[in-house]
């Protein structure tokens, strides 16, 4: 069974934890590392169980705490090639970070299968995600800041 835990959701910051028995992922880190760590603790989520950070896009309300949080906890960052390039150009991602470019292929992290899909938004190269749990049937989907939802 997937644990779906919204940590923050507003124009001042967005972040969601999604996990299963083998660990989990964060989708976006839109508040400071300190605020994100506190919210994870308040929700009984062990940071060492987070095996990846998946980004929807490069806007600051989705990436404000990313640089410090990812480097501090040595968590790889997954995003589309366009989002990674935009974040490198802004200085958010650098040599302290492990960044992995994803586009539309399914990837497995912490026992979760994560399928990215393109979204409609005024950003470099936005993505949403369909996450399937370890049981192969439980699913959650995340699409943020999108102008429309495609099939």
Image (tube, rainbow, N blue to C red):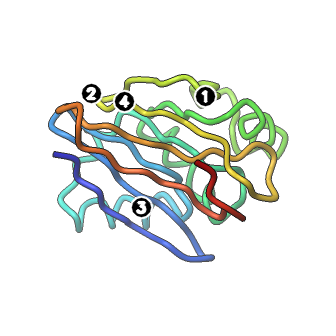
Image quadrant in which the N terminus is located: top left
Q: Are marks 1 and 4 in contact (CB under 8 Å)?
A: no
Q: Is 116 left or right of 47, judged from the image as shown?
A: right
Residue that mark 4 sits on: 113
Residue that mark 2 sits on: 111
Q: Residue at coordinates 72% horizontally, 65% vertically from top-left?
A: 147
Pick whichever, 6 or 44, lies toward us: 6
Regarding mark 2 in the picture, which secondary structure is present there? loop
- Distance Cα–Cα, label 3 vs label 2: 23 Å
Which label sits in the foreground, 3 or 2?
2
Q: Are marks 3 and 1 in contact (CB under 8 Å)?
A: no
Which label sits in the foreground, 2 or 1?
1
Regarding mark 1 in the picture, which secondary structure is present there? loop
Residue lying furthest front = 151
Q: Residue at coordinates 55% horizontally, 48% vertically from top-left?
A: 68
Residue 23, image quadrant: top left
Residue that mark 3 sits on: 36
Q: Are marks 4 and 3 in contact (CB under 8 Å)?
A: no
- Distance Cα–Cα, label 3 vs label 1: 28 Å
Q: Are marks 2 and 1 in contact (CB under 8 Å)?
A: no
**Residue 51: where, in percent of width, then height?**
36, 33
- Distance Cα–Cα, label 4 vs label 2: 7 Å
What is the total number of numbered labels drawn onto the structure image? 4
For label 3, count other residues whose C-alpha is less than 10 Å away and answer few (under 14), some (14-19) or many (20+): many
Which label sits in the foreground, 4 or 2?
4
Residue that mark 1 sits on: 104
Tag 1 or tag 2, which sits nearer the N-term? 1
- Distance Cα–Cα, label 4 vs label 3: 24 Å
Q: Is 36 left or right of 86, judged from the image as shown?
A: left
């Amino acid at each position: 069974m997937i644990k779906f835990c919204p940590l923050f959701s507003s124009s001042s910051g967005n972040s969601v934890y999604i996990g299963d028995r083998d660990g989990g992922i964060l989708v976006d880190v839109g508040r400071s590392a300190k605020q994100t760590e506190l919210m994870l603790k308040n929700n009984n989520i062990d940071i060492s169980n987070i095996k990846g950070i998946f980004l929807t896009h490069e806007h600051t309300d989705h990436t404000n705490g990313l640089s410090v949080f990812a480097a501090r906890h040595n968590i790889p960052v997954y995003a589309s090639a366009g989002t990674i390039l935009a974040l490198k150009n802004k200085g958010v991602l650098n040599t302290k970070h492990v960044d992995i470019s994803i586009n539309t292929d399914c990837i497995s992290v912490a026992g979760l299968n994560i399928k990215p899909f393109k979204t409609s938004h005024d950003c470099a190269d936005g993505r949403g995600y369909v996450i399937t749990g370890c049981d192969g049937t439980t699913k959650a989907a995340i699409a943020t800041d999108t102008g429309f939802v495609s099939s």
